[in-house]
Image: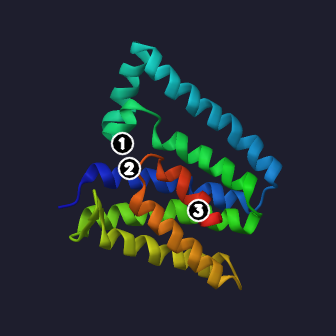
Amino acid sequence: MIPWLEVRRKIMHTYPIVIPIGYQYLSKETALKILLPICAFYVFCDILRHLHAGFNELFERVIASRFLRERERRGLIGSTYFIFGTILTILLFPKEVAIAALFILVISDASAGIVGSGWGRTRLFGEKTLEGSIAFFITGMAVVALTMKGNLFWGTLAVLGATLVELFSLRLDDNLTIPLVAGG
């Protein structure tokens, strides 16, 4: 049976594919000028919902009940980690590497979640499944093959590392750690 909360979350997770696509045509500075205010807005909303009961009630009704996991209700939401991880990735890595890492975050993480929750049978670690991890690795390798011309060896190591981070993400949200490991 497919858990629809996870499917909805992962579909929402694919909308940010516009970031690596757009970054291909923008300078690092322009991309950051766009992303930094978005990040500030997400952080502001995350803090506000913990401090203001009325805002939190609205947030719960409109967003949390449809998309958030229980742990995200107590801390920062995945989207905040996502935008922060995106900014760090753009700041730290050459453009080609950052674009590949961000595509891996968007495509591979969504694939792992959908395949793992819908068809995963072999539990590896917590809620993570072998099938989800294989989907992450295969889609990550497809991204590397399409974006990292001539860097297949290093791309393979990056995808393997990102797959392991997605599998074993414990304390830090994988929206932050996946692109940093994939880029490294």
Distance CA(mark 2)–CA(mark 3): 22 Å
Question: Nearer the N terminus, badge 1 or badge 2?
Answer: 2
Please state, as top left, top right, bottom left or bottom right, where the N terminus lies in the image: bottom left
Q: Estimate the x, y position of residue 116 in percent, counting from the top left.
A: 30, 65
Mark 2: few, some, or many residues within 10 Å (few <14, many ≥20)?
some
In the image, what residue occupies the spot 44% across and 21% down?
50
Q: Is residue 49 above or below residue 166?
A: above
Mark 1 lies on residue: 67
Mark 3 lies on residue: 181
Q: Estimate the x, y position of residue 115 in percent, counting from the top left.
A: 32, 67
Mark 3: few, some, or many residues within 10 Å (few <14, many ≥20)?
many
Question: Nearer the N terminus, badge 2 or badge 3?
Answer: 2
- 156, 104: nearer the viewer: 156
Mark 2 lies on residue: 9
The amino acid type, in three-letter code, at marker 1 is: Phe
Q: What element carries label 1?
A: helix
Marks 1 and 2 in Cβ contact (< 8 Å): yes
The amino acid type, in three-letter code, at marker 2 is: Arg
